[in-house]
């Protein structure tokens, strides 16, 4: 069934033309003009139209746009914007109209080129069409998001179903602080250049997104960029709510940036890659509605994780958390993470064995529901690199180790009581980031004796 909403421009035009050519009456005498009459009393302005008022409506040929919903879900919002405009404007469906899956809906608008966006009732983008030429009668089919093959050819994938490593950001229009800054370590095993996502898509990234942005902003433009702590080459990869990919390398020096014009509301998954394999780069990801860029940061903005500080067990852990009970399975529990950061642990006075450089926030958190006779926690690096281990127990006591087995650290907690354990994996050297696996076990496993 097709339902039409008309702008009514043709009716208005005909009415004005009729009044201008009105018939009858004597021709006015220019030497004896009629006496002036009182101006008409002002009237209340007409109520606003259902259609958006910021579109360029011009007298001329009209066209019909038919929306065909083949998305498998209900469409609650239709945004139609001239491709020359910087923002999406208002919802053309209004407060009460929807388009059920399998139905169609029609609008009339002047002939032109438009950007189109359909959103479901959760305000997530169902589909987006850029530069749609509207002339005569044209149909836009809102389809299901196509799954993109993100296999790099060696079995590695960018997986938007995984939890983001460094958390999420929920942003609305005019969000503060602006820019939003998140400390991130780039890199991973997935070869992005092997996925055919686009000419600018390259580098090596983790399978899980580094950050997830949930946008409900109707922003004119959004900039996302990464600034490395040191002069190192990073890349940027973004998957938008429509499933489209955006990438950049070396926008400013070696720092990447992507600007999204008229960004759709919904979920954005963001990866920061390293240009070279087995390279991990510490730095800061920025999200802004302003004109900031890697060379134009606001005064006092952080440029990454570097520069002293403390270990903050009140902060959210960067690589997740787990709740464990005595006799937990599988044993050992494993968590992949990357060591390193800007805090010099040896300068904190935590103990003779406490050393290395770690992030301020914990890397991992254990919530131990029951006492355990013995709990072993150790880290095994992917390559032969020197890592350290720092643990804070429920009583605020610190435990540290370096080089339990080779370069891999391990701490054994005898009679571990229930409560919160915060864990940091440090790198022995400054500005070094080490990928590996954290193991938690009640068994006799160690770095040389893995299951």
Image: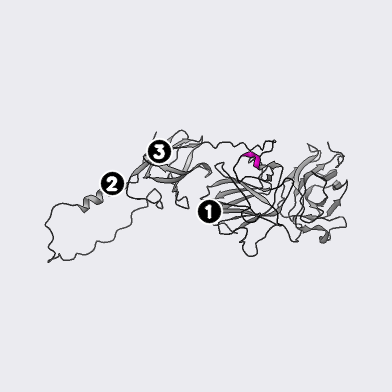
What percent of the width, then of the height, locates residue 310? Answer: 76, 59
Mark closest to the chain's N terminus, 3 or 1: 3
Q: SS for tag 1?
A: strand
In-image side of 44 versus 195 (left or right):
left
Instruction: Please identify the quarter of the rendering in which residue 354 is found.
Output: bottom right
Q: How many marks?
A: 3
Neighbours of disc 1 within 10 Å: few (<14), some (14-19), many (20+): some
- The residue depicted at 81 percent of the width and 52 percent of the height is 390
- Answer yes or no: is residue 94 visible: no
Instruction: State yes or no: discs 1 and 2 in contact (Cβ < 8 Å).
Output: no
Query: In terms of secondary structure, what is the magenta stretch mainly?
Result: loop
Q: Position of residue 156 (x, y in %)?
A: 69, 38
* Residues at marks 1 and 2, CA–CA distance in whole angstroms: 37 Å
User: Does the stretch in magenta take in 198?
Assistant: yes
The mark found on residue 422 in the picture is none
Mark 2 lies on a secondary structure that is: helix
What residue span does the magenta drawing correspond to?
193-202
**Which residue, given by chain and number where applicable, does mark 1 sit on?**
221
Check residue 11 in the rendering and tell me which mark sits there, or answer none: 2
Give the residue at mark 3. 138
């Amino acid at each position: 069934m097709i339902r039409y909403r008309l702008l009514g421009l043709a009716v208005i035009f005909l009415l004005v033309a009729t009044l201008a050519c009105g018939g009858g009456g004597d021709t006015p005498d220019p030497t004896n003009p009629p006496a002036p009459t009182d101006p008409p009393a002002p009237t209340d302005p007409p109520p606003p139209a259902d259609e958006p008022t910021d579109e360029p409506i011009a007298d001329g040929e009209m066209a019909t746009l038919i929306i065909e919903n083949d998305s498998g879900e209900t469409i609650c919002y239709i945004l139609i914007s001239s491709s020359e405009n910087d923002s999406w404007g208002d919802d053309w469906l209004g407060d009460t109209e929807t388009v059920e899956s399998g139905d169609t809906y029609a609008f009339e608008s002047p002939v032109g080129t438009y950007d189109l966006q359909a959103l479901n009732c959760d305000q997530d983008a169902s589909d987006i069409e850029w530069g749609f030429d509207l002339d005569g009668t044209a149909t836009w089919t809102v389809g299901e998001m196509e799954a993109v093959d993100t296999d790099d050819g060696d079995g590695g994938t960018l997986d938007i179903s995984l939890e983001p490593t460094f958390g999420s950001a929920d942003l609305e229009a005019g969000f503060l602080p602006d820019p939003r800054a998140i400390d991130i370590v780039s890199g991973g095993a997935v070869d992005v250049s092997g996925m055919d996502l686009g000419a600018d898509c390259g580098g090596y990234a983790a399978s899980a997104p580094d950050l997830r942005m949930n946008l409900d902003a109707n922003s004119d433009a959004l900039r996302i960029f990464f600034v490395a702590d040191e002069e190192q080459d990073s890349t940027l990869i973004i998957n938008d709510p429509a499933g489209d990919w955006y990438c950049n390398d070396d926008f400013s020096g070696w720092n990447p940036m992507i600007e999204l014009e008229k960004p759709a509301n919904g979920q954005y998954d963001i990866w920061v890659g390293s240009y070279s394999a087995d390279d991990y780069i510490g730095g800061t990801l920025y999200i802004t509605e302003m004109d900031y860029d890697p060379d134009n940061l606001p005064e006092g903005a952080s440029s990454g994780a570097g520069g002293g500080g403390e270990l903050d067990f009140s902060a959210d852990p960067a690589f997740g958390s787990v709740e464990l009970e005595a006799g937990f399975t599988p044993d050992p529990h494993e968590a992949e993470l990357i060591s390193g950061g800007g805090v010099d642990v040896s300068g904190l006075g935590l103990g003779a064995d406490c050393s290395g450089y770690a992030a301020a926030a914990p890397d991992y958190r254990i919530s131990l529901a029951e006492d355990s006779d013995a709990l072993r926690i150790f880290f095994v690096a992917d390559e032969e690199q020197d890592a350290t281990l720092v643990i804070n127990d429920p009583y605020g006591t610190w435990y540290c180790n370096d080089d339990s087995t080779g370069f891999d650290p391990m701490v054994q907690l005898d009679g571990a009581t229930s409560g919160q354990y915060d864990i940091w994996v440090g790198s022995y050297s400054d500005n070094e980031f080490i990928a590996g696996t954290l193991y938690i076990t009640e068994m006799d496993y160690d770095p040389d004796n893995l299951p």
